[in-house]
Image (cartoon, rainbow, N blue to C red):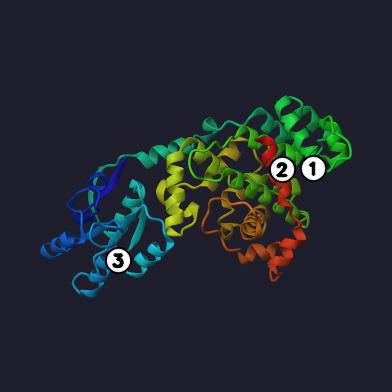
Amino acid sequence: MEAEVQKQISVLLIDKSMTELDELETALRIYGNCEIRKFDNINSAIRGISSDQPDLIITEWALKDYTAAELLQLLQSRAEWKDIPVLLCTANKNPAIISRARRFGARQIFSKPINQNMLSMSLKKLFPTTSKKAKSSGSEDDIRKQLLSIDKLAPPPLLVSAIIEVNNDPHSSGQDLAEVVKQDQSLTSKILKIVNSAYYGMYRKVGNINHAIVLLGFEEVKNITLAACVLQNYSTDDKGNFDWNSFWLHSLEVANIASKIAEKIPKVKPDDAFVVGLLHDFGKVILHQYFPDLFNIILENAEMLSLSEHQVSRKMLGIDHAEIGEIVARSWKFPEPLLKAIANHHTPSIASSQDLDIHIAHISNYFAHRFGMGKSGNPVPDKPYEKSLELLGLKGKDPEAVWESFKIDSSKFANIIESVE
């Protein structure tokens, strides 16, 4: 694969750590043809700028003599220097520092360790390309290729496929569901633990799935079963600082909100909406399981740059969790409306008025972010799309009142998560 190479640029690097200066230099060498000078303090760097003005400055915030604030202010005070772009690369996530750096003119702020793809994208925006070609490292291409083979990475458990089959069959019964669940003793015991928990307040112990279906209803037990099965089969053991219990709480809330909204929409089945809500962010689970370091970098940069997680993922990888989730769901033989909803829950503007699953997924996600207890790892949630609100009969309604009408009880979801752990 061939990729464009940037013209040679003069870059001035400032960091008190020589090790990190060397790492940054390596990242720039990978990018292309750069003339690089390195400094470990502001005073020396200013002399370097005076003797030979660089095209770009990349600096740490806290340095040996001053902070980058002093450098940024000096650059802004001189007409000949004020247009030099400055990129801040720091491990300090203090919001006050980030805000100050932006106020003083930092073009972009990177979280350490700097991500090669993010750096390359910034440099491509800052500097024009030539027609010269060179072989690229292909790392982004390789990642995307692996992600597009997600059906091999995340084959659906037989039980998930069977439950989805029951879900998609309009003639399925409680007995069909019970027969599926009985195939897995571990899952059966977890479902019975959930049903017998204090949340449901059963007056006597429920001993089998058939009895649970009689007492709670087919739809309720089917939803519990699918949720428990997904949580059981896609363990999110800790490979970073992400709160996975909070993530699953968010997913279950979106599922239940989607089901509540669908009850008032004749063309959408509530149980289909539940599946979309449960799996709308499932691509994040795949990123976590197979690319944990990349996923952590995406989350860190989203937080640092105050961008949505899916925006950062698109910039870094050319793909986001919504598309990855769709790939997985397609391999699981989901019906097309559910696939489209998972793929486009962040982009409802491309949906038609007939794509009600997309609008439901988008608005359910909005309500869960605004009022729910869980967190999806997205520091900048979507605003509600007006057309979606209109199509779902929610336009002009007070969001607080709508949320109250859903009667969402998060203790039920916490109970499911606890029982499956």
Q: Which mark is residue 198?
A: 1
Left or right: residue 4 compared with residue 226: left
- Residue placed at 25% from the left, 53% from the top? 15
Task: Measure the C-alpha gap from mark 3 to mark 2.
Answer: 48 Å
Identity, as a three-letter code, of the amino acid under mark 3: Ala
Rendering quarter of residue 110: bottom left
Residue 3, percent from left and from top: 29, 46
Of the pair 165 and 242, the residue shown nearer to us: 242
Disc 2 and disc 1 in contact, CB within 8 angstroms? yes
How many callouts does the rendering have? 3
* Residue found at the far front of this picture: 65
Task: Measure the C-alpha gap from mark 2 to mark 1.
Answer: 9 Å
Identity, as a three-letter code, of the amino acid under mark 2: Asn
The residue that disc 2 covers is 415
For label 2, the SS is helix
Q: Earlier in the sequence, mark 2 or mark 1?
A: 1
Residue 285, percent from left and from top: 55, 40
Residue 386, percent from left and from top: 62, 67
Question: Alpha-carbon neighbours of circle 3 within 10 Å: few (<14), some, or many (≥20)?
Answer: some
Left or right: residue 367 compared with residue 27: right
The residue that disc 3 covers is 69
